[in-house]
Image (tube, grey):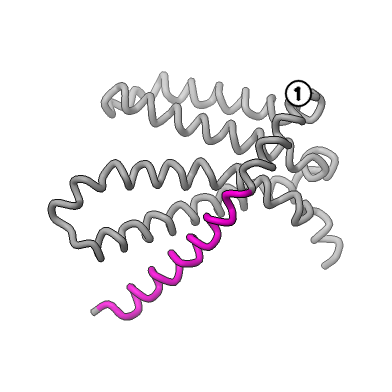
Amino acid sequence: MAGILRRFPTISATFPVYAVIAVPIFGWTMTSWLWKLPSWLNFLTPGEITSLFFYAMLTAFVESVFVYGFLLLLSFLLPSQMFRDQFIVRGTWLALGLALCIFANGLWRGMTRFTYAEVSLTAWSLMSLVVIILLTFVSARVRFMVRAAEWLSDRLTIFLYILIPLSVISIVVVIVRNTFSG
Protein backbone atom coordinates (compact mmCIF):
# COMPACT_ATOMS: atom_id res chain seq x y z
CA MET A 1 0.00 0.00 0.00
CA ALA A 2 2.84 2.39 0.84
CA GLY A 3 4.35 1.77 -2.61
CA ILE A 4 1.13 2.79 -4.31
CA LEU A 5 0.80 5.94 -2.21
CA ARG A 6 4.35 6.96 -3.18
CA ARG A 7 3.19 7.22 -6.79
CA PHE A 8 0.98 10.19 -5.86
CA PRO A 9 2.25 13.70 -5.05
CA THR A 10 2.31 14.96 -1.47
CA ILE A 11 -0.72 16.67 0.04
CA SER A 12 1.17 19.97 0.21
CA ALA A 13 1.71 19.78 -3.57
CA THR A 14 -1.87 18.88 -4.41
CA PHE A 15 -3.72 21.75 -2.73
CA PRO A 16 -2.13 24.51 -4.85
CA VAL A 17 -2.88 22.58 -8.04
CA TYR A 18 -6.46 21.97 -6.94
CA ALA A 19 -6.79 25.71 -6.33
CA VAL A 20 -5.63 26.42 -9.90
CA ILE A 21 -8.26 23.98 -11.13
CA ALA A 22 -11.10 25.10 -8.87
CA VAL A 23 -10.86 28.89 -9.14
CA PRO A 24 -11.61 29.10 -12.90
CA ILE A 25 -14.33 26.47 -12.70
CA PHE A 26 -16.08 28.03 -9.70
CA GLY A 27 -15.53 31.51 -11.12
CA TRP A 28 -17.11 30.63 -14.45
CA THR A 29 -20.00 28.88 -12.70
CA MET A 30 -20.66 31.90 -10.47
CA THR A 31 -20.46 34.22 -13.48
CA SER A 32 -22.96 32.08 -15.38
CA TRP A 33 -25.27 31.93 -12.34
CA LEU A 34 -25.11 35.71 -11.85
CA TRP A 35 -25.75 36.24 -15.56
CA LYS A 36 -29.05 34.33 -15.27
CA LEU A 37 -30.07 35.79 -11.90
CA PRO A 38 -31.98 38.87 -13.19
CA SER A 39 -34.32 36.73 -15.28
CA TRP A 40 -34.82 34.24 -12.45
CA LEU A 41 -35.95 37.06 -10.15
CA ASN A 42 -39.05 37.41 -12.36
CA PHE A 43 -40.41 33.90 -11.88
CA LEU A 44 -38.53 32.01 -9.12
CA THR A 45 -38.77 32.32 -5.37
CA PRO A 46 -35.67 33.20 -3.31
CA GLY A 47 -35.54 29.60 -2.03
CA GLU A 48 -35.52 28.20 -5.56
CA ILE A 49 -32.81 30.66 -6.61
CA THR A 50 -30.71 29.67 -3.59
CA SER A 51 -31.12 25.99 -4.36
CA LEU A 52 -30.07 26.62 -7.97
CA PHE A 53 -26.95 28.32 -6.62
CA PHE A 54 -26.06 25.31 -4.47
CA TYR A 55 -26.71 22.90 -7.33
CA ALA A 56 -24.41 25.00 -9.53
CA MET A 57 -21.71 25.03 -6.85
CA LEU A 58 -22.00 21.26 -6.44
CA THR A 59 -21.61 20.86 -10.20
CA ALA A 60 -18.51 23.07 -10.14
CA PHE A 61 -17.11 21.00 -7.28
CA VAL A 62 -17.70 17.74 -9.15
CA GLU A 63 -16.08 19.18 -12.29
CA SER A 64 -13.04 20.39 -10.38
CA VAL A 65 -12.66 17.04 -8.57
CA PHE A 66 -12.92 15.27 -11.93
CA VAL A 67 -10.07 17.34 -13.42
CA TYR A 68 -8.09 16.96 -10.19
CA GLY A 69 -8.57 13.19 -10.37
CA PHE A 70 -7.33 13.24 -13.97
CA LEU A 71 -4.12 14.97 -12.86
CA LEU A 72 -3.66 12.50 -10.00
CA LEU A 73 -4.19 9.64 -12.45
CA LEU A 74 -1.49 11.11 -14.70
CA SER A 75 0.79 11.35 -11.69
CA PHE A 76 0.10 7.70 -10.87
CA LEU A 77 0.57 6.40 -14.40
CA LEU A 78 3.57 8.46 -15.55
CA PRO A 79 7.06 7.95 -14.14
CA SER A 80 7.62 9.98 -10.98
CA GLN A 81 10.35 12.18 -12.44
CA MET A 82 8.05 13.04 -15.33
CA PHE A 83 5.03 14.40 -13.42
CA ARG A 84 4.93 13.68 -9.67
CA ASP A 85 8.23 15.32 -8.78
CA GLN A 86 7.19 18.54 -10.54
CA PHE A 87 3.47 18.25 -9.77
CA ILE A 88 2.89 21.89 -8.81
CA VAL A 89 4.57 23.31 -11.90
CA ARG A 90 3.35 20.82 -14.46
CA GLY A 91 -0.09 20.42 -12.90
CA THR A 92 -0.57 24.19 -12.80
CA TRP A 93 0.37 24.64 -16.44
CA LEU A 94 -1.74 21.69 -17.53
CA ALA A 95 -4.76 22.94 -15.55
CA LEU A 96 -4.35 26.48 -16.90
CA GLY A 97 -3.94 25.23 -20.44
CA LEU A 98 -7.01 23.03 -20.25
CA ALA A 99 -9.06 25.85 -18.70
CA LEU A 100 -7.99 28.28 -21.43
CA CYS A 101 -8.69 25.68 -24.11
CA ILE A 102 -12.19 25.05 -22.80
CA PHE A 103 -12.83 28.79 -22.42
CA ALA A 104 -11.64 29.50 -25.97
CA ASN A 105 -13.74 26.61 -27.26
CA GLY A 106 -16.80 28.14 -25.59
CA LEU A 107 -15.98 31.57 -27.02
CA TRP A 108 -15.60 30.07 -30.48
CA ARG A 109 -18.96 28.36 -30.25
CA GLY A 110 -20.52 31.56 -28.94
CA MET A 111 -19.10 33.63 -31.78
CA THR A 112 -20.31 31.16 -34.40
CA ARG A 113 -23.71 31.11 -32.71
CA PHE A 114 -23.54 27.36 -32.06
CA THR A 115 -23.16 26.35 -35.68
CA TYR A 116 -20.61 23.76 -34.56
CA ALA A 117 -18.08 24.17 -37.32
CA GLU A 118 -16.64 20.79 -36.37
CA VAL A 119 -13.73 20.65 -38.80
CA SER A 120 -12.04 23.85 -37.66
CA LEU A 121 -13.01 23.34 -34.03
CA THR A 122 -11.62 19.81 -33.91
CA ALA A 123 -8.36 20.81 -35.59
CA TRP A 124 -7.99 23.82 -33.30
CA SER A 125 -8.70 21.72 -30.21
CA LEU A 126 -6.16 19.05 -31.18
CA MET A 127 -3.50 21.66 -31.93
CA SER A 128 -4.11 23.43 -28.63
CA LEU A 129 -3.91 20.15 -26.72
CA VAL A 130 -0.55 19.39 -28.33
CA VAL A 131 0.71 22.86 -27.37
CA ILE A 132 -0.59 22.43 -23.80
CA ILE A 133 1.15 19.07 -23.42
CA LEU A 134 4.42 20.48 -24.78
CA LEU A 135 4.22 23.52 -22.48
CA THR A 136 3.44 21.27 -19.54
CA PHE A 137 6.54 19.18 -19.96
CA VAL A 138 8.83 22.10 -20.91
CA SER A 139 7.60 24.17 -17.96
CA ALA A 140 9.79 22.42 -15.39
CA ARG A 141 12.94 23.47 -17.28
CA VAL A 142 12.12 27.15 -17.84
CA ARG A 143 12.78 29.21 -14.72
CA PHE A 144 10.14 31.84 -15.53
CA MET A 145 7.46 29.18 -15.99
CA VAL A 146 8.44 27.48 -12.72
CA ARG A 147 8.25 30.74 -10.78
CA ALA A 148 5.00 31.80 -12.46
CA ALA A 149 3.34 28.46 -11.69
CA GLU A 150 4.49 28.47 -8.08
CA TRP A 151 3.44 32.10 -7.60
CA LEU A 152 0.00 31.62 -9.17
CA SER A 153 -0.77 28.36 -7.39
CA ASP A 154 0.33 29.86 -4.08
CA ARG A 155 -1.90 32.93 -4.55
CA LEU A 156 -4.95 30.94 -5.60
CA THR A 157 -4.72 28.62 -2.59
CA ILE A 158 -6.38 31.27 -0.41
CA PHE A 159 -9.61 30.80 -2.38
CA LEU A 160 -9.85 27.23 -1.08
CA TYR A 161 -10.85 28.71 2.30
CA ILE A 162 -14.04 29.84 0.57
CA LEU A 163 -14.54 27.14 -2.05
CA ILE A 164 -14.15 24.05 0.14
CA PRO A 165 -16.72 25.15 2.78
CA LEU A 166 -19.00 26.29 -0.05
CA SER A 167 -18.68 22.84 -1.60
CA VAL A 168 -19.44 21.10 1.69
CA ILE A 169 -22.52 23.31 2.23
CA SER A 170 -23.61 22.58 -1.34
CA ILE A 171 -23.31 18.84 -0.79
CA VAL A 172 -25.37 19.05 2.40
CA VAL A 173 -28.06 21.26 0.81
CA VAL A 174 -28.40 19.01 -2.25
CA ILE A 175 -28.59 15.86 -0.12
CA VAL A 176 -31.18 17.41 2.20
CA ARG A 177 -33.25 18.77 -0.71
CA ASN A 178 -33.25 15.44 -2.52
CA THR A 179 -33.89 13.40 0.62
CA PHE A 180 -36.68 15.43 2.18
CA SER A 181 -38.42 17.04 -0.81
CA GLY A 182 -41.80 15.64 -1.52
Residue 141: x percent and y percent? 82, 26
Of all residues, the one furthest to the left in this rendering is 43
Locate residue 110: give its quadrant.
Answer: top left
From this view, report whether residue 69 is shown above or below residue 78. below
| In the displayed structure image, the side of residue 105 where residue 32 appears, left or right | left
The single residue placed furthest to the top in the displayed view is 120
Image quarter hosting the N terminus = bottom right
In this figure, which residue is indicated by the disc labeled 1?
A: 144
Q: Decide: is 42 above or below 168.
A: above
Picture coordinates of residue 31, whole percent (x, y): 37, 42
What amino acid does circle 1 point to? Phe
Q: For numbered disc 1, what is the local secondary structure?
A: helix
Percent x, y of residue 153: 67, 41
Q: Counting other residues with Cα less than 10 Å from the Cα at mark 1, is it few (<14), some (14-19), or many (20 or more)? A: few
The stretch of residues the image draws in magenta is 158-181
Q: Which of 145 and 126 is in front in this view?
A: 145
Queried whether the magenta region covers residue 165, the answer comes back as yes
Q: Please tell me which residue is depicted at 43% across the width and 64% down the height of the picture.
A: 170
Q: Which residue does the image show at 62% across and 23% down from the upper left?
A: 131
Between 16 and 180, the residue placed more toward the observer is 16
User: What residue appears at the point 26 percent right and 26 percent down from the top-left corner?
Assistant: 113
- Residue at the location (85% across, 40% down)? 81
* 40 magenta-colored: no
Could you tell me residue 171's position as x and y percent? 45, 67
Q: Main secondary structure of the magenta part?
A: helix
Judge left or right: residue 2 versus residue 38: right
